[in-house]
Each structure stands twice: as structure tokens, then as C-alpha cells.
Image (cartoon, grey):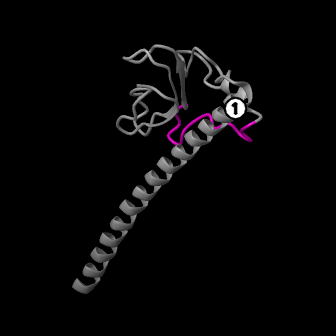
Amino acid sequence: MIELLVVIAIIGLLATIVMVSLNNAREKAKRAKAMADVNQIRTAVELYYAENGDYPCPGEYFPAELGNPVSCLQPALAPYLKAYPTTDPWGSYYVWHYNFGTVDCNVECISVSSMGADGNYEDHCISIGDDYTAYIAPGC
């Protein structure tokens, strides 16, 4: 009977270790997907710039308070993206930021970001916490 309890305890311990590893692997996969999506959007924006001489959707910040985050970018980038990724793996919209003079040194900073697992958008010109930001135009 004791041997059976020891075997069950060992199986339970191994199952716990496997579940923790699986959860870590899922989070890493989500981060990798978010990074890939953000870089894909950045590449499409750079292709748009190369063809049009300007970045799409100037003066825009998405998601705005009640705005549709793809209302401008999705049609603008349609020739460059097969499918526009609207939400990150945690269910938040990707953030597009293209406003002039909004950073401390009044320099243009264009970026696309994932808000990460916490769903909080920290800063459009700096990756903070679990956010992942791809910079399209130089900031400070």
C-alpha cells in the first residue's frame, strides 16, 4: 500500500512539473506570436512607405477610446499583408501610434505594439514590462 502511495505521489509531482513547463511554453509561444505579428505589421508599413513616400494613418492612435483600431491601417496595408492581425494572443488590439511631437523631445515616433499579457499599454516609444514594441520611425 505504501509503495502505491509513493508511486501516486511521484506521478503527481511529475504531472505538476509537466504542467508548469507547458504553461511556460504557452507564454513563450504567445510572446513569439506577438513579436512576429508586430514585425509583420512593421514590414508592411515600411513597404507602404517605400511605395507612397509617407507612413499610413498620420495623426492616429489606435485603439482610440472608442475607435476601431483597423479602420485605417487594415485597408492601407491590404496590398502588403495577406491577413491583418488585429489582436494579440492575449486578446488585446495591437496599438498603432503615429502622432508628431508626442514624445519628450518633440520628435516623431511611429510604433506598433502589443500590450502583452497584462493588457496595459505602457509607452509608445519604449518597450516597458511585458509590452513588445516595433519602432518604425526613429524617436528620441
- Most extreme residue toward the right is 79
Q: Is residue 14 above or below residue 123?
A: below
Q: Quadrant of residue 10?
A: bottom left
Question: Which quadrant is home to the C terminus?
Answer: top left
Q: Residues within 10 Å of mark 1 (few under 14, many from 20)?
A: few
Residue shown at 34%/65% (left/top)?
16
Residue 56: where, in percent of width, then height?
Answer: 66, 23
Residue shown at 62%/34% (left/top)?
86
Residue shown at 43%/61% (left/top)?
22
Q: Quadrant of residue 8?
A: bottom left
Answer left or right for 80 relative to 104. right
Answer left or right for 14 relative to 57. left
Residue located beneath label 1 in the image: 50
In the image shown, does 109 or 123 lie closer to the viewer?
Answer: 109
Residue 25: where, in percent of width, then height?
Answer: 44, 58
Residue shown at 71%/39% (left/top)?
81
Question: Which quadrant is home to the N terminus?
Answer: bottom left
In the image shown, does 64 or 72 lie closer to the viewer?
Answer: 72
- Magenta stretch: includes residue 85: yes
Q: Is residue 14 above or below residue 68?
A: below
Q: Main secondary structure of the magenta part?
A: loop
Residue 76: where, in percent of width, then height?
Answer: 72, 26
Answer left or right for 36 relative to 106. right
Magenta residue span:
80-93
Q: Secondary structure at mark 1?
A: helix
In the image shown, does 20 or 110 lie closer to the viewer?
Answer: 110
Q: Which kind of residue does numbered mark 1 sit on? A: Ala
